[in-house]
Image (cartoon, rainbow, N blue to C red):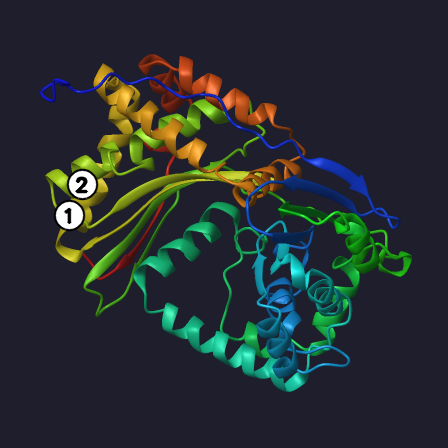
């Protein structure tokens, strides 16, 4: 019988079961990557466009284009589109981001051809009907107005503006009037300029039929969808790094939204892996130092977390939480104390072992199955990287020491460099 009074020994599992993508290029130049796997006759077809909000020349352009693709085409209404998707047991997911916009089709193989035909029609011939657009924008505007009363939302949006600037697409804070200024012509212009094969790649995952390549070529490989514009990537000046603070007074707030952080680099930086692990120790999982101190010991909040965000042209670090108005200042002080401790207090052997076990397990779970692997592979494509990036992360996780974590924190996470936004009642 095992001795249950003793904790089992831990051993890092560091072998990633990669599914090697098979690559091809359609006749119009669209790169396609196939990730074969799974046991069900079911596939995910995802098209990723270099068409995030970074490229728009009017607020909400990219967001509205992607969200309204299924609102109607030149020959079909929203109701007809939804009925067909239901008939094919298909699901569409759109994801407009800052650097990219993607749309995914999930469908059974037996409905693949007609579903792909509908998918092609939505992508290539959207009508952006005026009535659908206005209804959508009114609803989004109402959600925006509601969010303006939520301290966590305000802390997030003002923080991005604080670290990048109000004119930078990474920092622009949407205003209520932006929803009124968008016109159907704006959507058609953005769609024509960015939603085509010349600015995209496709990742297919699942158990695919032998005809998968030909079906994709028929749907997305024709020459007229290649795109006919040569565009320069817009450039925006970066703000000079200096400590800045914003306190937004919300008179009737019961809690304060707190966000502390700074502009940093993205996943292509050589220091990224070490910093990612240091961040996890600080606030990247339930057993982190921030959680143990501010939630478990002090009881100031239900949850607190820190994270590193990778954007194509930048990156940033942040700590986020909500705390009662009466403990806002105490929470803020403890956040800075934990940043200081990360530089000065080495992780104990048990703390470091638990961190490594958690990170290795969660990382390997993120590769579980062909759909998950397609998500990880998409990240690499967006940043121009290959699978060695993930191998390097696991190598770093295996060898990193407490001293390495302290050094990374000393270089990049000094409390004196942080910017902060607090949204709530005066304290």
Above or below 399: residue 24: below
The reply to whether callout 1 and callout 2 are in contact (CB within 8 Å) is yes
Q: Quadrant of the N terminus?
A: top left
Residue 236 visible to the viewer: no
Which residue is the extreme one toward the left?
5
Q: In the drawing, what numbered circle is on residue 294?
A: 2
Would you say 109 lies left or right of 256 here? right
Residue 58, image x and y in percent?
65, 65
Q: In the drawing, what numbered circle is on residue 300?
A: 1
Would you say 301 lies left or right of 136 here? left
Q: Nearer the viewer, residue 87 or 261?
A: 87
Residue at coordinates 12% horizontally, 17% vertically from top-left?
3
Residue at coordinates 54% horizontally, 34% vertically from top-left?
266
Numbered disc 1: secondary structure: loop
Circle 2 residues within 10 Å: few <14, some 14–19, many ≥20:
many
Q: Quadrant of residue 417?
A: top left
């Amino acid at each position: 019988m095992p001795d249950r009074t003793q904790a089992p020994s831990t051993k890092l599992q560091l072998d990633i079961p990669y599914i090697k993508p098979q690559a091809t290029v359609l006749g119009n130049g669209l790169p396609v990557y196939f990730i074969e796997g799974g046991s069900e006759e079911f596939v995910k077809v995802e098209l990723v466009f270099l068409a995030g909000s970074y490229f728009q020349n009017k607020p909400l352009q990219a967001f509205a284009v992607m969200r309204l693709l299924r609102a109607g085409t030149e020959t079909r209404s929203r109701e007809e589109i939804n009925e067909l998707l239901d008939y094919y047991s298909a699901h569409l997911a759109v994801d407009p981001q800052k650097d990219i916009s993607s749309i995914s089709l999930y469908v059974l193989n037996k409905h693949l051809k007609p579903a792909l035909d509908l998918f092609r029609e939505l992508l290539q011939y959207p009508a952006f009907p005026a009535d659908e657009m206005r209804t959508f924008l009114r609803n989004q505007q109402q959600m925006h107005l509601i969010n303006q009363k939520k301290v966590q939302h305000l802390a997030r949006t003002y923080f991005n503006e604080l670290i990048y600037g109000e004119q930078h697409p990474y920092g622009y804070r949407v205003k209520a009037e932006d929803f009124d200024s968008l016109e159907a012509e704006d959507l058609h212009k953005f769609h024509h300029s960015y939603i085509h094969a010349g600015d995209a790649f496709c990742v297919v995952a699942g158990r695919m039929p032998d005809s998968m390549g030909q079906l994709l070529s028929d749907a997305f490989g024709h020459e007229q969808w290649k795109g006919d514009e040569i565009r320069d990537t817009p450039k925006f000046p970066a703000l000079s790094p200096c400590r800045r603070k914003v306190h937004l007074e919300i008179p009737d707030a019961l809690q304060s939204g707190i966000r502390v952080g700074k502009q940093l680099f993205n996943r292509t930086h050589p220091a990224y892996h070490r910093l990612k692990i240091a961040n996890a120790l600080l606030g990247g999982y339930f057993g982190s130092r921030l959680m143990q101190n501010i939630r478990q010991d002090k009881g100031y909040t239900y949850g607190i977390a820190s994270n590193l965000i990778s954007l194509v042209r930048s990156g940033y670090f942040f700590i986020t939480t909500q705390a009662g108005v009466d403990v806002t200042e105490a929470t803020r002080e403890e956040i800075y104390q934990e940043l200081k401790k990360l530089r000065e207090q080495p992780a104990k052997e048990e703390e470091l072992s638990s961190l490594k076990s958690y990170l290795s397990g969660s990382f390997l779970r993120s590769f579980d199955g062909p759909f998950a692997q397609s998500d990880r592979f998409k990240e690499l494509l967006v940043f121009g990287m290959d699978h060695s990036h993930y191998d390097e992360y696991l190598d770093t996780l295996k060898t990193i020491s407490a001293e390495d974590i302290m050094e990374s924190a000393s270089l990049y996470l000094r409390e004196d460099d942080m910017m902060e936004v607090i949204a709530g009642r005066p304290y």
